[in-house]
Amino acid sequence: MEFVKYLKEQRPGKRLAIFGDGASYHNSQEFRELLKLINQEKPEEKWWINCLKFAPNAPEQNPVEDIWLQRKNFMIAFYHLCSSFQIVKWLFKFFADGQIFI
């Protein structure tokens, strides 16, 4: 919610479309009330902020899902090396830093 407020402040007078992944907090009552306050009962085509949801686990719509899947598969492949959580975190960062995105 703070991020939405920040975006609105950064683009005064501009209409925004925000794409989300359907996480429960993206559809909470509190979030819906914030959008209702911001959009001021306008018809949908005139909303200041419109939130659109990607289909769940749909890499063809949301490339971030594909990156998470690649990261997960990388971690599974090298999990045998993980004798501590510190090593798990290191591998996770190593994958992202190395930009091994197929």
Image (spheres, helix red, strand yellow):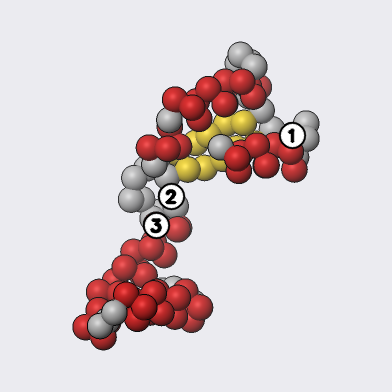
Q: Amino acid at mark 2?
A: Gln
Report x, y in % for residue 80: 21, 83
Q: Amino acid at mark 1?
A: Lys
Q: Is residue 57 visible?
A: yes
Q: Secondary structure at mark 1?
A: loop
Taking the image as shown, residue 64 lies to the left or right of residue 76, namely right
Which comes sooner in the sequence, label 2 or label 1? 1
Q: Are marks 2 and 1 in contact (CB under 8 Å)?
A: no
Q: Is residue 45 above or below residue 61?
A: above
Q: Amino acid at mark 3?
A: Glu
Nearest the camera: 40 or 65? 40
> According to the image, label 1 marks what residue?
14
> According to the image, label 3 marks what residue?
65
Report x, y in % for residue 72: 31, 68
Q: Are marks 3 and 2 in contact (CB under 8 Å)?
A: yes
Residue at 29% from the left image edge and 79% from the top image edge? 84
